[in-house]
Amino acid sequence: MRARSSRRILDAARWLVELGGIEALSMRRLAQEADVSVRTIYNLFGDKDGLVEALVRDSFDAMDAAVGDLDAA
């Protein structure tokens, strides 16, 4: 459940940032988009800085995986 909530939050955060920049990333709007409580976001990521850090880390992990797939091919 925790991993699924984290994934939904990160996906919604990425979408909000793509839509309106980092300024569009409010915890309340993110909670609505991810269908979780604001408290869940804070429990999983700490604060907005922690959320942004997790979002960046997730993006780098995805890029690493994509590069690994290219190397394997």
Image (spheres, rainbow, N blue to C red):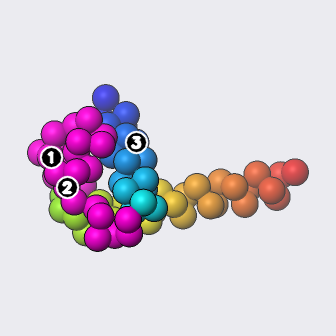
Distance between mark 1 and mark 3 Cα atoms: 15 Å
Image position of 2 with respect to 58: above or below? above
Classified by dominant secondary structure, the portion drawn in magenta counts as helix
User: Residue 54: x percent and y percent?
Assistant: 37, 60
Residue drawn 62% across and 61% down? 63
Tell me whether the residue at label 2 lies in contact with that at label 1, contact meaning CB atoms closer than 8 angstroms.
yes
Hey, which residue is sitting farthest front in the picture? 20
Magenta stretch: residue 29 in it? Answer: yes
Q: Secondary structure at mark 3?
A: helix
Query: Which numbered tag is attached to residue 27?
Result: 2
User: Residue 20: x percent and y percent?
Assistant: 38, 65
Q: Which residues are magenta?
A: 20-45
The residue wearing badge 3 is 7
Three-letter code, disc 3: Arg
- Which quarter of the picture shows residue 50? bottom left
User: Residue 27: x percent and y percent?
Assistant: 19, 55
Tell me whether the residue at label 1 lies in contact with that at label 3, contact meaning CB atoms closer than 8 angstroms.
no
Distance between mark 3 and mark 2 Cα atoms: 15 Å
Residue drawn 37% across and 34% down? 4
Tell me whether the residue at label 3 lies in contact with that at label 2, contact meaning CB atoms closer than 8 angstroms.
no
3 or 2: mark nearer the eye: 2
Distance between mark 2 and mark 1 Cα atoms: 6 Å
Residue drawn 30% across and 43% down? 33
Crowd tier of the residue under label 2, counting other residues whose Cα lies within 10 Å: few below 14, some 14–19, many 20 or above: some
Task: Name the N-terminal-most of marks 3 and 2.
Answer: 3
Task: Name the N-terminal-most of marks 1 and 3.
Answer: 3
The residue wearing badge 1 is 38
**Which is nearer the eye, 13 or 52?**
13
Image position of 44 with respect to 55: above or below? above
Crowd tier of the residue under label 3, counting other residues whose Cα lies within 10 Å: few below 14, some 14–19, many 20 or above: some
User: Residue 67: x percent and y percent?
Assistant: 72, 60
